[in-house]
Structures are given as structure tokens and as C-alpha cells.
Image (cartoon, rainbow, N blue to C red):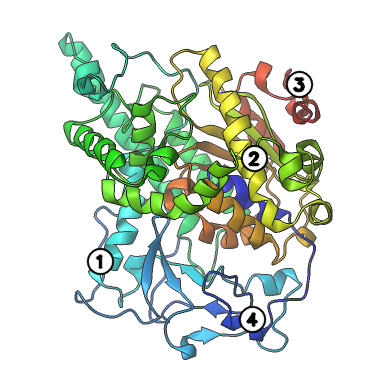
Amino acid sequence: GKLKCVSSLLSCVSSSRKNRRDDNNRNAGNFRGSVTCRPNPGGKARNVNFADEPKLKLDRPLSPPQSRPGDAVSVGSVTSGKSSVYFEANEGDRKDWQLPDGDDSFHSLDSFGELEIDGQYFFLARDDPNLTRDDYNLAKDALEGIHLYPPIPTTEPDPALKSPVSLSNMQTLLHSYQHVPQSLEEKRQEDDELANTEKLGLALEHQAERLLLAPENRGLTTSGMGISTKLLLQDLKAPKIRVREKGFPGELTEKELEAVTVFRSELDKRDPVYKGIVQSFSVVEKEAYALCRFLRARKFDVEKVFELLDEAKDAWAEAKKNNFYPDLESSMGVSKAIFLSQYPAVMSGNAKNGCPVMYLRTGLIKPDGIKCIVSIDKVDKFFWNDTMYSFTAKLKDGREQNPNFVRCETLTIYDLKGVSRSQINSDTFDMIKVGNGVMTSFPETLHCLLIINAPSWFGFVWAIVKKLIDPRTASKIEVFTNAKSGLERMNELIDSSQIPSDYGGIGPALAKAAGG
């Protein structure tokens, strides 16, 4: 769900000359427009050549850094944010910061490329010899979470389990309870499913590695992103056998079931806000599925899930007090229809697996219009409303199409057709921060993201975007550089009856869907 709002990078708001040097003393949470934090010059970047290397293999296990436990990091501290490892530019010595020469305001594409977000610089831990073993493990764990609980996109309805999942009988959450081989052939099929899940999990892990860890000195071009997606799709399509939905109720191991039991018990003991966040979709999501959704986001580590809930609780509690803003016109001062006319993020139809489909046509976003109708401090109300009302309504539609549909996920499509470079500037990041703050309350709600009609210069934009997302989210992203390939993938995932007429389907046009 995080990427739902990151798309603002491609759209909002008109350029301005701001972020002067005197802004460098702002709080650490604010955007430091003129600060560039560079990695240790001694760190070595690994080259990725898509032409010569058809499939980039992740070394397993990763080679630990050549440093002793307890060694200090050369630039400030290293922290884990959203499952990723970052340098914090607001820490460390002043000499480690580099400021652009001359006027440090920015208003061109070239100067924009020198910026880092919030002083955070994403890097590959194993490439920096100055990192401690703990720092290295953070980066390693971020990628392994994809492998352990692979978010594999599906093209068909979820199969029915042998018995309904019920927390009154916790055994129903176990794979060993729901899947008992009756013959040698069935046992062989189950082994094949597990092996295929392992293979596809690694394919998704490789996608995240390619998209996030391309060398900073070379970057990842739009064509390279397209090639990476092609490699991913080849792995996802072959061989065509079922996979296990690891981490879902009915597919758990004994150890994972124990984590569910502990998590559920702790929710009853701790701040009631935590339980409220987990049960946000209770009208459409059974408790067992909600518990597992949060646990999958942190590899079934209960304490790490509570760390995630700590990040979300203040914003969620404030929105809860206002019932998640059911009347946007009174909350934002503008109707939802008017807001969507400037920011066309529209849910329309359901995928073949039942997931609601959200479309964002970034080239049609009107940055100046957004600034005219609403202030940035009110934009979060749109995201709360859209998630708690529009999203849940579409989930109900998915349940009606297929009673076995149990996911609380969206299939999201970003159409970059018509996006111009002039739409990209510093004020964009205020919008991104607002959106990310909201979506922290809703982990594991992105099924997959298709970026279609990506322009040739999107690779430049990606160099900025990738610093705002975690590896698990990156593994769900597919990039298409032309309309034909993007539409083909859409038709694999969505039936033509559910695809808007804007994209060659027979479903209602997006303009009609936006109007309700």
C-alpha cells in the first residue's frame, strides 16, 4: 500500500525556489532539500549488466562485511526504516555532508537528481566494509522476508480450504491440518508446490534486488527496469503449477501459529489502539487473516509488529476520532468528485483473484489545481476516506464474486502516459509523506503494482522513488515501457469485463467510476 501515494512524485506540485541553506537546521523529519549524503567512498558498488546477465542471482547467504562487531559506522548511525537500511544525514559529522555548489535552490531536473530524501541514503549493507554485523543483518533480513513469505501475484480465485478457518480451533490455521496427502502422488504434488513457491519467492527477491540495489553511480534505466520485469514474469509463469500462500491462515507452520497466538494475546493486554488498527477492516476481514497480514509484514516477529503499530497509532487514533472522514466535503472543504478531477485515483472493478483494482493516471494530475482546492495538511483525509470506505466497498464486491476470496489487497495500476518532467519538484515530497503516514496502518495491502507507459526518463525518477519504499514493496512492482505489454499484463490479471473502456475493456470508463 505504500506506493499508492508515492506516485505523487510524478505529479505534484508546481516548481518553487525553496529549501535554502538556512533550512538545513530544520527538524530531522523535514525535507532537507539541499543536503546530499554520500556513502563511504570506500564502499564498492556491484555492477548489474542486464544484457550480459539474464538473471541476477542473490548470493545466499550474503557475505558478511569485513568488520568487527561494535565497529562504528562512518556517517552517523544506521537505522532500519520500513525494513530497509538508511544513512541518516542529520547525524554524524558536518564534514560528511556535501552541498551543491552555487545557488542551492533547485528548479531543474538535473539539480533535482542530486537530492536525497530526508537525508536518507539507501545502500547495500554488504558493500560497506565499515558496517557492523548487526547493520548487515538488517539489510539481509529485509530481502529474506520476501523469500520467506513471497507476495506472488495470482491470476485466479483463491481455492477453498478443506475446513473454514476459525480461531476457536487454532489447528485450522495450520497447513498440516488443511492439507493432508491421501496418496504418494498427492504428497509429490505438495512437494512440487513448495518447491515452486521457493523458486518464485527467489524470483520476487531478485526483482527487489535489481530495482533497489543498482549501483548509484550508474543507476537503473527505464529499459533496464523493463528487462527486469520481463525476467520476473518469465519466472512467475513457468512452471505452471500451484504455489503455497505462505503466511496465510490454513498455510501456517507450528511456529507461525505460535506467533499468531502470542500476538493475539498481547493485543488484548496492550494499548487498545493496537487492536483497533489490526481490526481496521473487520467488516470484510476475519480476525485470523488480519493477524496474519500484520505478521507477514514482519516475518511473524511479534515485537517487530508492535514497533510497526507504534509508528501508526497516533495518526490512526486521530483519524478514528473523526470516523475516518466519511464526509470529505466537510473535512477537506472540497467534494471527493472535485478532488478526483485534479487527482484521478479511482478504484474500478476487481481482478480475477477478487482484489479491487486502483488506477492512477499520473499524466492527468493537475498540480496547481490540487494546491488551489486543498492544503497539504488536509490531504490525509482523502487517503483515510479512500482506504476505509472505497477500498472496503470493493473488497465486499470481491467477496460476492468469490466467497473464498479472503485477501485485503489491491491490484494497483499507475499509468505514466503524459507525465512531464516539469511536474516533478520538491513540494511533491510533502504529499508522499502524508500518504506514507496513512498507509503505515495498512501493511500488506498491495497485491502487485503495474507501472505502464513508463517514459524513457522514468529511470531517473526511480532513483528517487526507491529511497521511499522497502524491498518487499519493490518485489511487487512490474514496469512496462509501452502500452501493448502493459495491457497484455493487465488482461492476464483482470477480466475484460472489469477493465475500464479507457484500456480496451468493456467495463465502465474511469470518469464514470470516479463519479460514483
Displayed quadrant of residue 133: bottom left
Q: Residues within 10 Å of mark 4 (few under 14, many from 20)?
A: some
The span from disc 1 to disc 4 (Cα, nearest Å) is 33 Å
User: What is the three-letter code of the residue carrying label 3?
Assistant: Pro
Q: Residues within 10 Å of mark 3 (few under 14, many from 20)?
A: some
| Residue that carries the numbered disc 1 in the rendered image | 134
- Is the C-beta separation of discs 3 and 2 under 8 Å? no
Residue at x 76%, y 51% (from the top left corner): 419
| Residue that carries the numbered disc 4 in the rendered image | 23
Residue 94 coordinates in the image, percent (x, y):
48, 89
| Residue that carries the numbered disc 2 in the rendered image | 325
- Judged by depth in the image, the label closer to the viewer, 2 or 4, is 2
| Residue that carries the numbered disc 3 in the rendered image | 508
Residue 289 coordinates in the image, percent (x, y):
37, 28
Residue 236 coordinates in the image, percent (x, y):
44, 32
Q: Is residue 113 above or below residue 165?
A: below
- Judged by depth in the image, the label closer to the viewer, 1 or 2, is 2
- Is the C-beta separation of discs 3 and 1 under 8 Å? no
User: Considering the numbered disc 4 on the image, is that residue within a helix, a strand or a loop?
Assistant: helix
The span from disc 2 to disc 4 (Cα, nearest Å) is 33 Å
Among the two numbered marks 1 and 2 on one chain, the one whose residue lies closer to the N terminus:
1
Q: Residues within 10 Å of mark 1 (few under 14, many from 20)?
A: few
The span from disc 3 to disc 1 (Cα, nearest Å) is 52 Å
